[in-house]
Amino acid sequence: MTTRSGDDRPDVPVADLRSCYEAHADAYDAAALRALRSGWYVLGEEVERFERDFAAFSGSRRCVGVASGTDAVELALRALGVGPGDAVFTVSHTAVATAVGIERAGATPIFVDVRRETMNMDPDLLERAVARLRVEVPQLRPAAVVPVHLYGLPAQMEPILRIAAREDLLVVEDCAQAHGARVGNQPVGTLGAAAAYSFYPTKNLGAFGDAGLVCTQDVSTDGALRALRQYGWEERYVSARRGVNSRLDEIQAALLQVRLTHLEADNARRRSIADAYRDGLAGVDLTLPPVDPEGGLHVYHQFVIRSARRDELRARLADRGIGTAVLYPLPVHRQPAYADSISADWPLGESERAAVEVLALPMGPHLSEDHVTRVINEVRAVAGRRQ
Ligand SMILES: *Cc1c(COP(=O)(O)O)cnc(C)c1O
């Protein structure tokens, strides 16, 4: 085996955005040209068509395209009336964007620990966090919960919805990593009051630039979102409320229409890669990710293993040409900018432990069968068998 220098491209990259384009290049070229030649570049027919397509795909009544997933979290909360003085419960083991969106809405994120097995929000701890906040921080109103379907695995929505109903919390699902996932028979994003999607290029449904979208089942929330994303306009030049500029552009919307037609097949490919990893890595000395929840569907935005020797495994895999990623190396409450959060010293031990143990293996439709076999063989070689 040859040892590789640190900076060259891995033989098996953890993700490959160019290959996403190349897989259907003619269709993307045609869609981009159609948008360019139309003479209309922001919030037009392409955006409307994509909003309709995504509503049909995701089982939502209304979809509103916005400029990013972070904006989608912010605007979903704002459209539902969540803002300053409100506490929004979410997880710390997530993309920092979840917390950014909550704070941009003017609300205060309260971090709830994850379950070790799922790495998603622990519903029992949600209940405890709400009770603790009411006692210790009575000036904040418990207003909403933002469960994250991390890595494509649906959060435990049934208990979360039950607690939310009892505690009078709005539910905004963060679906940025879970396009096409299901809780039981129901698509994610249809269970709460609203849901936020990101189409950042690496996501299961990725644009070729920034883009995001909010789903809701409710016509009045839809109207509020359409106003909020464009200066609060309910009619042109009249700001009925304070809004922002978070518009989706026509080129991204045209490209997303194409990508959406391949999402089911791409997700199926991710699931078959996950099955191959599970078979190939059985008995190896690491923790494999949780399987599909009961009746639900995991869409494997990432295939994340855990190991107490994570950094060593990562370095040795890099030497053998296998790209990996650490998502996320620091929980949000340990980020310098968030260290003074109200809940930063509440029990978040599983989130902290996840941050030192998680390792994402290459995942996505860019992987060939040979790539998958290669990943399995190299991981088996470096991790060894379980004692
Ligand atoms: C990517 C992501 C976001 C934010 O999306 P952007 O489009 O980058 O703003 C939010 N939440 C989670 C869980 C994400 O993975």
Image: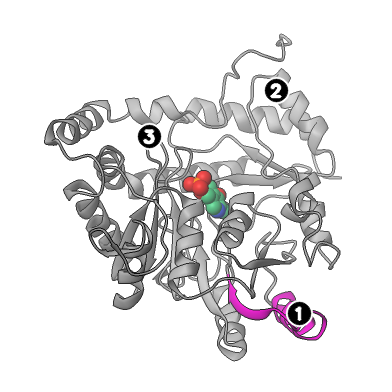
- Asked if residue 218 can be seen in this view, the reply is no
Q: Place residue 333 in its image quadrant.
A: bottom right
> Nearer the N terminus, badge 3 or badge 1?
1
Q: CA distance from mark 2 to mark 3?
A: 27 Å
Q: Is 330 on the left-hand or right-hand side of 25?
A: right
Residues at circles 2 and 3 in contact by the CB criterion of under 8 Å: no
Residue drawn at x 60%, y 91% is: 166
Residue drawn at x 20%, y 53% is: 49
Q: Quadrant of the C terminus?
A: top right
Give the magenta-colored segment's residue range: 124-145
> Nearer the N terminus, badge 2 or badge 3?
3
Q: Which residue is mark 2?
A: 318
Which mark, by number, is residue 102? Answer: none
Residue 44 screen position, x and y as percent: 20, 49
Q: Which residue is mark 3?
A: 208
Q: Circle 1 — which element?
A: helix
For the residue marked with disc 3, what is the amino acid?
Phe
Residue 89 screen position, x and y as percent: 65, 71
Q: Pick whichever, 302 or 373, lies toward us.
A: 302
156 lies above or below 103: below
Q: Circle 2 — which element?
A: helix
For the residue marked with disc 1, what is the amino acid?
Leu
